[in-house]
Amino acid sequence: MFMKWIARALAALNSNAKKEQIAAGIACGVLLALVPSGNLLWIFLFGLFFFFKIHYGLQIIALAACKLAAPLFASGLDALGWAVLHSDPLQPFFVALADAPIAPLTRFNNTVVMGGLVAGIALWLPLFFAFRALVALYRARLAPRIAGSKAYGAFMKIPLVARLSKATSAVTKLRGALE
């Protein structure tokens, strides 16, 4: 399964997807990973991202990879959420939000949820610009070197990878014919 993720990520990096879509998908995946799931806020964010042009495959890969590391940051997210929720200027807003009918289902008053949301929003732009630059660098410098290597040729001969490569090229041709 891990090999499928790597193959799909490499296929996305080498596809016709815009580097902005790839970077936005990764940044959104990190944001979703920082916000604990099981509340209306996470569901709302997950659904909201489908209205934007992002790379959904890399969003899910980033979400899964970062969700594994999220417990390492739980204490920091808890402290950040506590600081935001106990900020005096924001108290009237949080009291009004707590009185709203659906807002408590978002669990905004949970310190880890609030800390994850604030950290994810704060990290979104830096992650977007960093991954946009990394994708451009990969496509300009690293991809041609990898494509010409013997290891890449051996990797492409793996049956699963060969099937994924054929399927990706068929979808790309079909997309070009439809546009």
Image (cartoon, helix red, strand yellow):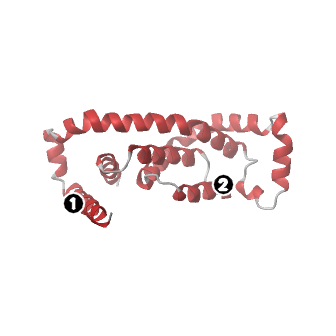
Sequence-wise first label, 1 or 2: 2
Who's the residue at 81% across and 46% down the image?
94
Q: Amino acid at mark 1?
A: Lys
29 or 173: nearer the eye? 173
Task: Give the residue pinned by disc 2.
Answer: 41
Determine whether the residue tagged by mark 1 lies in a helix, strand or loop: helix
Determine whether the residue tagged by mark 2 lies in a helix, strand or loop: helix
Quadrant containing the C terminus is bottom left
Q: Which mark is residue 166?
A: 1
Q: In x, y percent, where is residue 138?
A: 31, 36
Who's the residue at 81% across and 39% down the image?
90
Quadrant containing the N terminus is bottom left
Q: In x, y percent, where is residue 41?
A: 66, 54
Res. 46 image quadrant: bottom right
Q: Amino acid at mark 2?
A: Leu
- Neighbour class for label 2 at 10 Å: few (<14), some, many (≥20)? many
Instruction: Tell me if residue 60 comes above or below residue 128 in the rendering.
Output: below
